[in-house]
Amino acid sequence: QVQLVESGGGLVQAGGSLRLSCAASRSIFNINAMGWSRQASGKQRELVAAITSGGSTNYAESVKGRFTISRDNAKNTVYLQMNSLKPEDTAVYYCNADWVDKRFAQWGQGTQVTVSS
């Protein structure tokens, strides 16, 4: 298992930017995929972005062109750069690791992102 600790959430106005960071407790070099999910109040969790160990990325349609996921294996850290934020991006954002059986097995505690209109 790997422990995941998110940081970088906060309150931002619509159109603004935030960068989330996810620090892993051990090397992420061999982890097959890392990602970010979110859950808005009263809604189901949604996979926002994922990046494989080879660097391939995937994004939810709702964030394509605005969010960028990246990983720094030397720092055991995954990032989510969020630009052009919208009020509908408001949610708790979770860092994920280990893609198993079409879902992520490991989850962080989450960080709140609030976008005001």
Image: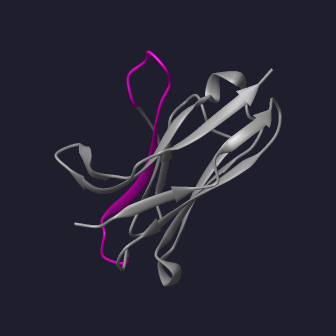
Q: In this view, does 34 lie above or below 58?
A: below
Residue 66 sits in which quadrant?
Answer: top right
Q: At 46% from the left edge and 76% from the top edge, which residue is drawn?
A: 76
Q: At 45% from the left edge and 60% from the top edge, which residue is drawn?
A: 5
Q: Position of residue 70 (x, y in %)?
A: 56, 62
Q: Quadrant of the N terminus?
A: bottom left
Question: Was residue 39 drawn as part of the magenta stretch in this picture?
Answer: yes
Q: Is residue 38 above or below residue 8?
A: above
Could you say which is closer to the camera, residue 54 or residue 74? 74
Can you see residue 66? no
Could you say which is closer to the camera, residue 93 or residue 59? 93
Can you see residue 51? yes
Is 5 left or right of 61, judged from the image as shown? left
**In the rendered structure, which segment of residues is drawn in magenta?**
29-45
Could you say which is closer to the camera, residue 62 or residue 14? 14
Which residue is farthest bottom? 74
Q: Position of residue 50 (x, y in %)?
A: 44, 51
Q: At 63% from the left edge and 47% from the top edge, which residue is drawn?
A: 9
Is 65 left or right of 43, judged from the image as shown? right
